[in-house]
Amino acid sequence: MGYEYILVEKKESVGLITLNRPKALNALCAGLIDDLGRALDDMEADDDIGAVVLTGSEKAFAAGADIKEMSEKDFMDVYLQDFITKGWERITTCRKPIIAAVAGYALGGGCEVAMMCDFIIAGENAKFGQPEITIGTIPGSGGTQRLTRFVGKSKAMEMCLTGRLMDAEEAERSGLVSRIVPNDELLSDALKTAQQIAGLSRPIVLMAKECVNRSYETTLSEGVRYERRVFHSTFATEDQKEGMAAFAEKRQPKWKNR
Ligand code: CAA
């Protein structure tokens, strides 16, 4: 089955998903979220793909959940459908790394989707925000929680209470994005970074991602203990042997993904 609202490509070992609903600034309608989930399922199942890049257009990564689609819903609709969580969380369950390459607006659900990815590389014109308060609602897909963890209470509270947008420089300064690149280099930079990750040992990459994510879910002492056990597990892999042998022999490792 094809896709209506996204473009899907394979660039060497990287899966590239481009949100493609330009007339609505990539507003995240149910069909788009369904497309995104199916693309991630396919990429997760594809052994040739080691990392994913999720991007939008130069004007908008995504301007939020589709306001027109949700405006007619009532409490029972959203409660019974578990509206907005359902489907969106597929991003957070993807085991392969996902890089968000964000140019333009990443607002509301767009900011939430970017934050569900493993890290964000921002184009110079990127703008982040949770403006739901200005349309009579609040973030519904983790914005109040993830933004607060990224940028701290004061900035997150101000943004959620006023709808103020954050530009790329402020987002980098606050830890929301890993770095800023010129807009015309955004995609090539994100693909290069994803390719670099995809070229490493697959199981070790998955383990590293799992450990960093664990830090959001547990106490420091439990997280450190968890990390140590996973670190120990790397010694059961062929790739740990190969990686360390290659270092000692001054050559590039040949990963077996075992
Ligand atoms: N949902 C549906 N349609 C949207 C949309 C959205 N979130 N954002 C933009 N669009 C549509 C506009 O309605 C417009 O369509 P028409 O041409 O048919 O009127 C088209 O995209 C272009 O938008 P604008 O004309 O508004 O473009 P602009 O450059 O003047 O403004 C903008 C850009 C500042 C991003 C503005 O579009 C805007 O404020 N969008 C809404 C942002 C927002 O409030 N997002 C939060 C949504 S709620 C949410 O996400 C809940 C959650 O937590 C999951």
Image (tube, rainbow, N blue to C red):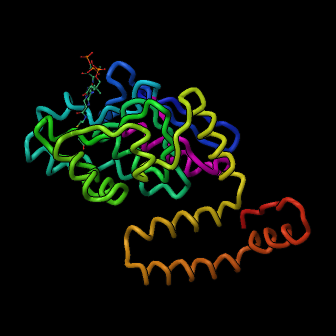
Foreground of the two, 221 or 44:
221
Q: Residue at x 69, y 49 (%)?
A: 196
Foreground of the two, 45 or 63:
63
From this viewpoint, which residue is outermost toward the right?
A: 249
The number of callouts visible is 0
Q: Residue at x 17, y 42 (%)?
A: 162
From this viewpoint, which residue is outermost toward the top?
A: 23
Q: Quadrant of the C terminus?
A: bottom right
Q: Residue at x 52, y 45 (%)?
A: 179
Q: Is residue 226 above or below residue 15?
A: below
Foreground of the two, 62 or 104:
104
The percent coordinates of residue 159 (x first, y second) are 24, 45
Residue 104 in view in this figure? yes
Quadrant of the rendered image containing residue 63: top left
Q: Residue at x 55, y 55 (%)?
A: 96
Q: Is residue 205 above or below residue 177?
A: below
The percent coordinates of residue 103 (x first, y second) are 46, 32
Quadrant of the rendered image containing residue 125: top left
Q: Is residue 240 left or right of residue 21?
A: right
Q: Which residues are magenta?
A: 33-56
Q: Quadrant of ligand 1?
A: top left
Q: Is residue 74 above or below residue 80?
A: above
- Residue 49 colored in magenta in the image: yes
Quadrant of the rendered image containing residue 188: top right
The percent coordinates of residue 7 (x first, y second) are 51, 29
- Residue 57 colored in magenta in the image: no
Residue 1 in view in this figure? no
The percent coordinates of residue 121 (x first, y second) are 51, 43
